[in-house]
Image (cartoon, grey):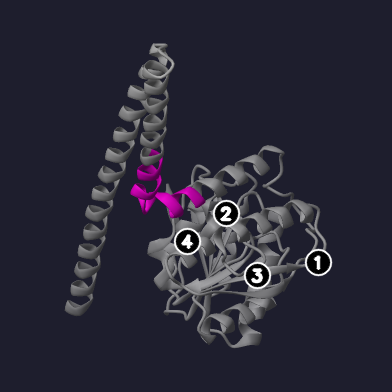
Amino acid sequence: MLQTIAMSAGKPDISIIVPAHNEAENVRPTVEAMGAMLRASGLAGELVFVDDGSTDGTGKIAAELAPQHAFLRVLAHTPRRGLSRALEAGFMAARGDILVFYPADLQFDANDIPLMVAKVREGFDIVTGWKQGHYDKQLISGIYNGLAERLFKTGVHDMNSVKAFRRALLPIFDFRSDFHRYMVVMAVEAGYRAGEVKVKLLPRLAGHSKFGGRWRIMIGVMDMLAVWFQYRFLTRPLLLFGSLGVLALLLGFCVGLAALYWRFVLNTGFRPLLTLTSLLSVVGVLLFAIGLLGESIQVLSRRVEKLERLLERRDQDWR
């Protein structure tokens, strides 16, 4: 359940979304840091604080601070739904034209936000922070980001960091669990321009990390391969299934020639070769048919998306 606890008036230029789970000690310093940054930079912004099912009073503290800060809005998730869904809720509730994601652990300097916003206003569609400084998982993060760059060619050094982007990008993002890490990939694959800004990484002073555990490395790699497969093949299913089908048919043809050679040249029958030939031929035809079916589904999907865009444009014209 998503509940709006507090809301300020007036439409901001930027919206800073801060998801939090059990960050009670960091709530007040985060709000104060964001307020000081907005005053110093002159940005007309709002802070959308999303309490993701906290059990330590994080949401209560944020709600108490809301009447004291006109720029603060507080949302609450009950029960906890995870970082990706908390971000989705914050993004959807945000009112700014430029959206910024910052965590509530105070490990990033709020004063880097104007630099990211300025980069977006230069013409970039999405800007990610390139972490500067030492941190415990730096080696693992480096390997992860290196692999991601080889697979996706985004042109940025750090995929899993703070971000700023134009509101127009929201419809392209997939907010499945942990897929917030691939917002830059989704943007680049959709034809948008990605940039980066060096941001200071600070030591955590209170609370503890919510992203530990050995299994997160394996989950991250599996998610990366899932995203790679989605953008490389699911948008062009015939490329994958058709290629596999052609390969199976070629193998079936070669095995069939070998069976004929054994039968008519060596005068030796070998029935398993005939069975394998039939199997490969059937599999090849089925894979090719699956690819054609996938292409048909893609055509229908693109037509539906086009119709949705036309309806949205019509609604905007009427308004």
Say whether marks 1 and 2 touch (CB < 8 Å): no
Say whether marks 3 and 1 touch (CB < 8 Å): no
Q: Nearer the viewer, residue 205 or 310?
A: 310
Q: Amino acid at mark 3?
A: Gly
- Helix, strand or loop under label 1: loop
Residue 127's image quarter? bottom right
Q: Position of residue 167 (x, y in %)?
A: 43, 72
Give the CA distance from mark 4 to mark 2: 31 Å
Query: Where does label 2 land, which residue?
Result: 59
Q: Is residue 112 magenta?
A: no
- Helix, strand or loop under label 4: helix
The part of the chain drawn in magenta is 228-244
Who comes first in sequence, dot 4 or dot 3? Answer: 3
- Residue drawn where x is 60% and y is 70% of the image: 155
Marking on residue 133: 1
Query: Where does label 3 land, which residue?
Result: 129
